[in-house]
Image (cartoon, rainbow, N blue to C red):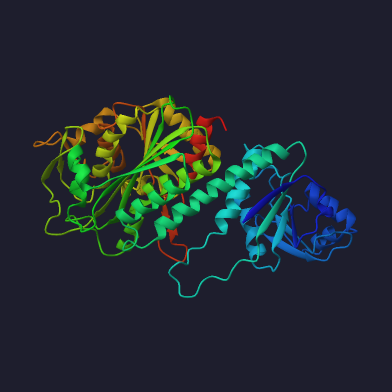
Amino acid sequence: MEFVVKSVSPETLKTATLVVAVTEDRILSDAATKLDTLSGGAITAALKRGDLPGKVGQSLLLHTLPNLKAERVLLVGVGKEAELSDRQFRKVVTGALNVLKGLGGSDAVIALGDLAVKNRDTYGKVRLLVETLADGEYVFDRFKSQKAEPRALKKITLLTSKAALADTERAATHAAAIATGMAFTRDLGNLPPNICHPSYLAEEAKALGKEHKHLKVDILDEKKLKELGMGAFLAVAQGSEQPPRLIVMNYQGGKKSDQPHVLVGKGVTFDTGGISIKPAAGMDEMKYDMCGAASVFGTLRAVLELKLPINLVCLLACAENMPGGNATRPGDIVSTMSGQTVEILNTDAEGRLVLCDTLTYAERFKPQAVIDIATLTGACVVALGGHTSGLMGNNDALIGQLLDAGKKADDRAWQLPLFEEYQEQLDSPFADIANIGGPKGGSITAGCFLSRFAKAYNWAHLDIAGTAWLSGGKDKGATGRPVPLLTQYLLDRAGA
């Protein structure tokens, strides 16, 4: 979908549909007031008839109003509040989009710039608006014999004032790039595991490298992982016929001397749990266990599109966790790249094993900061549900930057503690560390495990087990999170 920004009077635009706002109290937005005056009170007449109560997301379509160039005017309700929350604003936009999808016009004009959204300036409102519209257009029908009907809606024009023109254009550009990254992440997450395995992700990385001259791609195969001493990483993959891959993507958008930011993504392309096998019900959703890697892919895609002036290293730890004659057993002890030994008490706690060696590998890039992203623990879903990602780390400034980016992007995280007492739950009588810490505080002890391999730099861990995908039902699928949060963090670092 194409987004265009214009600063003109709404009645002058020839369009299939012009979208304006109205409250529950029949108060019209500035744009709607102007249209009502020009059309001889047609909008207020419809409201007096009770045709639109004006609750959040409700809509009313008016046809061929006099003295306007728009073929239709779509009134969308914004409720009673003088200021909308982010969630309410998204509902307003989604309500309008759902109507526009069913219309025949190829374009629409949206005049919602004068709405007040809590704690949002023009840039913030437009970011939410465009990301919601673009994400709402997403369809995954690659494996359907009957594809979705092509959408008629191809272009949306955003109306704004001259004073807000620059901020609106900047927000639309950023939002479109983020939406592209989210769609890429969702596509990868929604692919079936018989197609999307570690070698497939490696080929995707190579293809991205060929498209962008500032991106260098290296693929570390099983032989190289052995040479590096990545025993924990290899242990996860040894039960599968699919070989593991560590994907290294190095984007040089800043000065050569600038320390890079590093993103580390968990890419377990299917997780049976290994010998500690998962229950059969819902196991198909374990194809989403690579959504950490997918979100790093999507974030990199947004960064490349925006050509951000930063250096960024993306490390994707890709493996498949299967039971088999050669699979890791509970009780096995493995050596990590760092030299620490790990007793594997549960083979279903595999994400931290591929990540710990990758976090050690990240040291060679002398990073400003390292952020790992992983669908790591069901405990995080229990703690925070499906709305908020878990956040832990060893540097307060980095944690604050990520929390702030989550608020700006409406892709929120919540900090969990890494107190020393939790570390004691990982004690092992036979190795330096156990890979699980018992049933209490499972998401925290997973973060504690990773922290032992991230002491050489500023580090944060995002547990996205609850936010990376929606379970069950017709809406089942990857969400594209936390691409908005990560991209916002990098936008902030780039001063964009």
Residue lying at the far bottom of the rendered structure = 146
Please state, as top left, top right, bottom left or bottom right, where the N terminus lies in the image: bottom right
- Indicate the quadrant where residue 287 lies: bottom left
Number of numbered tags placed on the structure image: 0
Using the rendered image of the protein, determine whether residue 393 is visible from the camera's viewpoint: yes
Where is residue 49? Give x, y as percent. 81, 64
Please state, as top left, top right, bottom left or bottom right, where the C terminus lies in the image: top right
Residue 480, relative to residue 144: is it above or below? above
- Indicate the quadrant where residue 320 lies: bottom left
Q: Residue at x 23, y 51 (%)?
A: 348
Q: Residue at x 15, y 54 (%)?
A: 327
Residue 348 horizontal side relative to residue 458, left or right = left
Residue nearer the viewer, 90 or 84? 90
Residue 340 horizontal side relative to residue 75, left or right = left
Q: Residue at x 43, y 65 (%)?
A: 473
Residue lying at the far left of the rendered structure = 430
Where is residue 188? Give x, y as percent. 41, 56
Q: Residue at x 85, y 63 (%)?
A: 65
Residue nearer the viewer, 142 or 412? 142
Residue nearer the viewer, 141 or 424? 141
Where is residue 490? Give x, y as percent. 49, 35
Residue 330 horizontal side relative to residue 480, left or right = left
Residue 135, relative to residue 403: is it above or below? below
Using the rendered image of the protein, determine whether residue 51 is visible from the camera's viewpoint: no
Where is residue 8? Give x, y as percent. 81, 47
